[in-house]
Image (tube, helix red, strand yellow):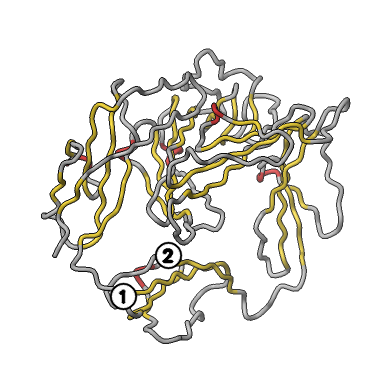
Amino acid sequence: MRNERIMIRHIFLFLMAVWFCGPPVVGQTAIVQQEYWLDGSPTDRQPVVSGSDIDLSALSMGLHAITVRAQDDSGLWSSPVTQYFIIGTAPQAATAISKTEYWFDDDVANHTELGASVSTIDLTGLSAGLHAITVRAQDDNGLWSSPVTQYFIIGTAQQAATAISKTEYWLDGDVLNRTDLGVSVATIDLTELSTGLHAITVRTQDDTGVWSSPVTQYFVIGTAQQAATAISKTEYWLDGDALNRTDLGMSVATIDLTELSTGLHSITVRTQDDTGVWSIPVTQYFVKMDEELPAATITQCVYWFDDDNEHAVSLPLTAPDGIVEITELGTMESGDHTLTWMVGDSYGRWSLPVTEAFSIVITGIGGVSGANLESSNLESHEGWYTLSGRKLPGRPVQTGIYIFNGRKVVVR
């Protein structure tokens, strides 16, 4: 028998105030209405009444999604929350793997079947360099597992690397002004750097011409009067709520998570040295579960600009470093904007949304204009910093992302 109805007993929507550069968010008082839609079709949304039935008889067999959002008495809507469910025949337990297939480098259209036995995979057609292989399996109920991706490198058959031929570095993310260190030990001149936090990035090249991955380390340049000697303060906040950060002090502390809901959360930590300089905040994600389940992993990311969550961009997090490249900044209009993002785990649970404000400045090289930063004078030569905290001597002379008077500004 098909399960054709869902009984809504309770709908819990946890709303958070997002910290960003601007006035504080007014606390909501009560939920006045709720609505839902099926399979990602918000134009067909329907009102929700607690205890009512949702008719699913028109849905096909297979995987579906229900999305719910709520509106408070000030007219603000919550972020949509999506849950997945399956409509199928009477359950039947899988007993064996019936099929296995793989593909290289995201080319899923040219997947190859491995069958059920151990097989040798032919790599002779791949070029030298970094590649990825993705594998998934199907059980005897016809259900596919989640794809699993591993990365590997194919070197040239003619020559293997035997030595390091070149080493180069750059400071504070300025890769265009990188310096060749050669192959011997060298002294790096830091006398031109300003007081504060900086970063140095290093990579090496072997004698086959292949570059290593860049490695970045952070360091602090103090004033001549006082250099940092110890960490004086450590603080953290949960789920991007930096307004409610907690001081951990200097000793090992237990962080109370009992008030957190079941699902995906984040914790952000930063430290302050005895000269008053703060480190860059470091964020880690974790899952709070109410039952024993296998460990979850973060598998996907969703982001949107301003209030346009109807056109949210969804991306899989398949890269080992979890970095997502946002390409839309080059086509956005000048002015003030916001970026909102969430991450999801392998059980389909989503983190709370995090919103950050930024501005787009057009023709930033010839003369910055077009953004409304309250009373800030964008033509000023003072108040410009790189993302790593390095103060600039004047207005930026290259396109990129900068900090101006405490706010992120995209100059293009």
Total labels drawn? 2
Other-residue count near label 1 (Cα within 10 Å), few / some / many at <14 / 14–19 / ≥20: few
312 left or right of 387 in image? left
- Residue 362 in view in this figure: no
Q: Earlier in the sequence, mark 2 or mark 1?
A: 1
- Three-letter amino acid code at disc 2? Asp
Q: Is residue 29 above or below residue 232?
A: above
- What residue sits right under mark 2 in the picture? 106
Q: Secondary structure at mark 1?
A: loop
Other-residue count near label 2 (Cα within 10 Å), few / some / many at <14 / 14–19 / ≥20: few
* Location of the N terminus (image quadrant): bottom left
Task: List the single residue furthest toward the left.
Answer: 58
205 left or right of 336 in image? right
Q: Is residue 68 above or below residue 245?
A: below
Dots 2, 1 in contact, CB < 8 A = no
Task: List the single residue furthest toward the top.
Answer: 375
Q: Is residue 342 above or below residue 346?
A: above
Which of these two is toward me, 371 or 41? 41
- What residue sits right under mark 1 in the picture? 94
- Residue 250 in view in this figure: yes
| Residue at 59%, 24% in the rendered image | 406
- Three-letter amino acid code at disc 1? Ala
Which of these two is toward me, 113 or 212? 113
Q: Secondary structure at mark 2?
A: loop
| Residue at 40%, 30% in the rendered image | 333
| Residue at 36%, 73% in the rendered image | 110
Q: Position of residue 13 (x, y in %)?
A: 34, 37
Single out the mark in the foreground, 2 or 1. Answer: 1
Quadrant of residue 270 in the image?
top right
